[in-house]
Structures are given as structure tokens and as C-alpha cells.
Amino acid sequence: MLALSRKKGESLIINNNIEVMILETHGDQVKIGISAPKEVPIYRKEVYLQIQKENEEAGVTDRLAEINSLLSGRKKADDQKKN
Amino acid sequence: MKASTRLFGDIDIEDDKILILENGIIGFPDMKKFTLIYDNESGNQQSIIWLQSMDEPHFAMPVLSPSLVKPDYNPMVNDDLLTPLGEFNNEDLVVLVTLKVPANAKDMTVNLKAPIIINYANKKGAQIIVENEDYPVRYPIYDILQSIKEEANK
């Protein structure tokens, strides 16, 4: 990873079209401003990773029949027969 | 467009049924082409839909309309994030939430934080992180679905 020191108010330019500026620092907290083209998605990493994990776990399920029955009411009817 | 899917076998999808998510879904930027597969057997409009990847045939995510499980769902979205949808009319937008069913079905959740939004007029879509701070990534829905079924069976 490239490490660069910056002071408050200083910036980085990435790929000619993205600017990352240090706006404020308070102890171990840093406020960052990002100017990027609208089509460039920007995420907080912990949120990104959480949603990536949800997508991955949701997308590899093999429980087709079970999931299809969730809303259909059939499973419930079967349960009642057993009782 | 043809694909040999894991859940649905060989499918052949007409071009106008292919959805383009130019940024992919979050965490999987290379999956850009999808199609929606409906569960016809149940004959129930309000049912699970499958967001089937055309690039990764093993990947199919169950999705559903948030109106089913969260009737007051009102995602707040930064307009810039909607750029992948192209120009759109609100009435052409379809919002879907992803469903995760773990080993214990009672732990099933939908992701209210990152819905899939599709512009049906041009078939472009994106997964968007919404600004609503009270919308969790894991919103439990088992009890909600049970009460819907009980209503339906009355």
C-alpha cells in the first residue's frame, strides 16, 4: 500500500479525476472529502464488506424449493396436515 | 443469451430480458448481466424472484418486493448513486431487497440497507446503499412471513 503524509487542507489526485482531501483531524478521527465522477461508487469499507458477505451468502443458496415455498402458503398447509 | 445455471438448468433469455448492472452488485463488480426468474408454480404474484447472474451461472440471489415485509419501506438515496440507471421516470423503477436464508430458516433476513433498483424502461440497474441509518443489512422476516401465511390461510 502506498503511504503518503498529508496535512489538513492538502489533497491527493488519483487517476486524473478523483481528488481526496483531508478536511479535519480530531485525535484519531479524520474527515475526508472526495471529489469523484458520479459513476465512481464510494463506500465505507466495513459497510461494503458486510453487504458483499450478504450478497455472497444469499447468492449461493441451493434451497430453491424451500425458499419458493416461503410465501406460497404450501409449507404452512403441510405443517397443519402433520398436526 | 444462454446460460447453464446451477438452480434452473440451461436457460435461454431474450436480450430484452437481460438486466445490466454496470457496477455489478456490491462486492462482485464483474457480475454485470442478470435476469429475473419468477416462481411460476406458486401462482402467487407476491413471491420470491430470483436474480440470476448470466456471467456466473452458479450465482442466483432470491429477492422480493420490500412492500411484502416492510410496507413503509422508503429508501433515501443520493441521486448520484442512481447514475447507472440512466435517465428514468420514477414509475419505471422497481425496488427489490435481497433475501438470505441460513441453515436455520428462522434466521432468514432481507437486506434493507442495499436494495437492487432497476429501471425497467431500459433494463439498467444497480445495488445502492441507502442513507436510512435505521435500515439494517439483516432485517429478520421469518415472523413477518408466518403472519402473512396465517392471514392467507384464514
Image (cartoon, coloured by chain):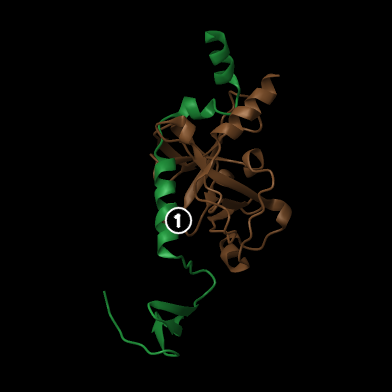
Tell which chain the image draws in green.
A
Residue under the point 54% across and 20% down? A75
Between B115 and A83, the one lying in front of the other is A83
Q: Amino acid at mark 1?
A: Ile
Residue under the point 57% across and 34% down? B48
Residue B20's x, y, as percent? 52, 53
In which quadrant of the rendered view does residue B36 lie?
top right
Q: Residue furthest front?
A: A27
Write down the chain letter for disc 1.
B
Residue B17's x, y, as percent? 57, 44
Q: Is residue A49 left or right of residue B14?
A: left
Residue under the point 45% across and 44% down? B53
Residue B41's x, y, as percent? 58, 23
Q: How many marks?
A: 1
Q: Is residue A74 left or right of residue A55?
A: right
Label 1 neighbourhood size at 10 Å, few (<14), some (14-19), many (20+)?
A: many
Residue B124's x, y, as percent? 58, 55
Residue B55 appears anywhere in the view: no
Residue where numbered disc 1 is placed? B26
In which quadrant of the rendered view does residue B133 lie?
bottom right
Q: Quadrant of the C terminus of chain B?
A: top right
Q: Dot 1 lies on which element?
A: loop
Q: Is residue B118 left or right of residue A50?
A: right
Residue A64 appears anywhere in the view: yes
Chain B tint in image: brown
In which quadrant of the rendered view does residue B57 lie?
top left
Relative to B14, say whether B19 is above or below.
Answer: below
Relative to A4, say whether B30 is above or below.
Answer: above
Residue under the point 48% across and 25% down? A65
